[in-house]
Amino acid sequence: MKKQFKTESKKMLDMMINSVYTHKEIFLRELISNASDAIDKRYFRSLTDAALAPEGGYSIRIDVDKDAKTLTITDNGCGMTADELENNLGTIAKSGSGEFKTANNEGEGTDKIDIIGQFGVGFYSAFMVCDKIEVYSRAVGETYANKWESSGADGFTVTPCDYEETGSKMVLYIKEDTENDKYSEYLDTYKIKSLIKKYSDYIRYPIMMDVEKQRRIDEENADENAEPKYEKYIETETLNSMVPLWHRSPSDITAEEYNSFYQDKFYDFTEPAKVIHFKAEGTVSFEALLYIPKKAPMNYYNKSFEKGLQLYSSGVMITEKCESLLPDHFSFVRGLVDSPDLKLNISRETLQYDHQLKVIAKNIEKKIKTELKKLLEQDRDTYEEFFKEFGLQLKYGIYTSYGMNKDVLEDLLLYKSSREKKYVTLKEYTTLMSEEQKNIYYACAESVDAADMLPQTDAVKGKGYEVLYFTEEVDEFTISMLREYDGKQFMNVCAENLDILTEDEKNAINEINEKSKDMLDSMKEAIGEGVTSVKFTSTLNEHPVCLSSEGGISTEMEKVLSKMPGADSEFKPKAEIVLEINSNHPIADKLRSLYESDKDKLADYAQILYAQARLISGLSIANPTELSNKICSIML
């Protein structure tokens, strides 16, 4: 007699089938997990009664019949009685695994039982791909079996049957293909193997299936000119690897095993720069196997890149890319996290409680930082190669967080410097600073050589100070968020208030500027809005001229901001540029002479010097033809 489900059946079952799960392929993961749970229960009982253990060990088997369009999943787990079939499969959202776990995890000193299934709805995901389900089951210790059968929300039947094995066999009658869904793919050997590998590779019991293969049968006496002969044969394959690499002790895993797992799992042809394998216990216990790549994927710095770690619960994959486990500044990290403590939602595709992910993510962030610092200290060459690929992301991590992540990232930054033009850390820079040096000096340009040739760089180096070279657009913005390091302020060598003069030198140059005020104002008028002022300086050594900037926006910042959307608006940020002229260079005397004798030619000189200073700073000039004509007129 057909029985009705013990809920408002059609409405409830329709919701389970059509709304709970995102992808139809999830059904196989759910059924494999249920089979694993059933074996867990039998194994647990066999600990106190060895006679309950099956001969030949525990296993899960998958069989395909394309003619009958059936997919069969068999396990030698605990099985179910007629009442259990009716109660567990006839009541939607009732879980025998959940009750078993609750009952046996009570009491102090009891070992926790790791049962995957809790909600009792995973079984019904099978109706997403099949029209009818038959479950043949014989409980451990029972002498007879029963068959549960249902075609969906119209109800189910439970009848005695002749099934002779202890455990359960589920037969799915796969739906006919439609225009939008190709259900027959779930009868394809390759598809089944790929789904097992994706979701259930680390189920602790072997998942076996007969696979058709081909072999050559005429190799020994083959005629070179004859067509080779082959025969087909059936071989039983174990589809899952069972024991996850991350469950093994790191001391028992070779570098080759780590690298092979990484390359196979994450499709990278190169070996990783660093392997991070650790276990954490506490509010949320988990194991993590993380990899720092050597090379950035081709799409890493564009919108198509998706960050995230694979998330497992007791060896079953829940999410292929869990974004919440990685901060953006460490988005390059690949790997996985496995936790038995996750409180999953009803579909086991997402978490019920976000705070669990936050706890795990915080632990992972700390561990990644620690291991990157170790790599920096213990294998500098490898770290520098890593930094060339991902250093930009670390810098963005400081800038986009408005400096909130600086404690995590500042000691991981590297910059080329005037000291041999090699990479240095901020800590290495400040450690080598002389006592009289007040600031951390940096120069911005498109390349290290261009930064090194700036007149202001030469001036700072002349004082015996080291200069950091900023060659990426984000560099100066990152430093503006750091503000200081180890109590030392960052100072752009092109800043107008560059403080490298003694008090006597400052007084002397101020006096020169005061005496030349009218001439300098006349030069500023000739240049126009391009500069806020023209000044003499005594810091340029042999160089005649340079540009410096006042305020918070430098010329390099202006170049970056000018490329951004909306840069042509009237509110475009602009650097306040100062034209600085070397008071000790012969050009200074020439300018004074022209001011007395030929103010028109002085205006030409001012415009030429301004254009030269712009070129030195890597800035464009508005009218190159006009500049060329002025230079030629002076040469005549």
Image (cartoon, rainbow, N blue to C red):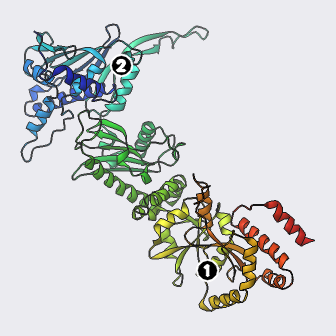
Instruction: Report crowding for label 1: few under 14, some 14 to 19, many 20 or more residues within 10 A (C-alpha).
Output: few
Q: Dot 2 surroundings within 10 Å: few (below 14), some, or many (20 or more)?
A: many
Within the image, what quadrant is residue 26 found in?
A: top left
Give above or below for 343 relative to 33: below
Tell me what residue is drawn at x 27 percent, y 47 percent: 354
Q: Residue furthest front?
A: 570
Give the label on residue 464, or none.
1
Report the side of 297 relative to 38 (left or right): right
Residue 177 appears at what percent x and percent y? Answer: 38, 13
Q: Which quadrant would the C terminus be assigned to in this image?
A: bottom right
**Amino acid tagged 1:** Gly
Q: Secondary structure at mark 2?
A: helix
Q: Nearer the viewer, residue 361 or 253?
A: 361
Where is residue 282 drawn, in percent x and y? 22, 53
Residue 534 or 77: which is nearer the viewer?
534
Name above or below for residue 215 compared with residue 270: above
Instruction: Please provide percent x and percent y for residue 280.
Output: 27, 52
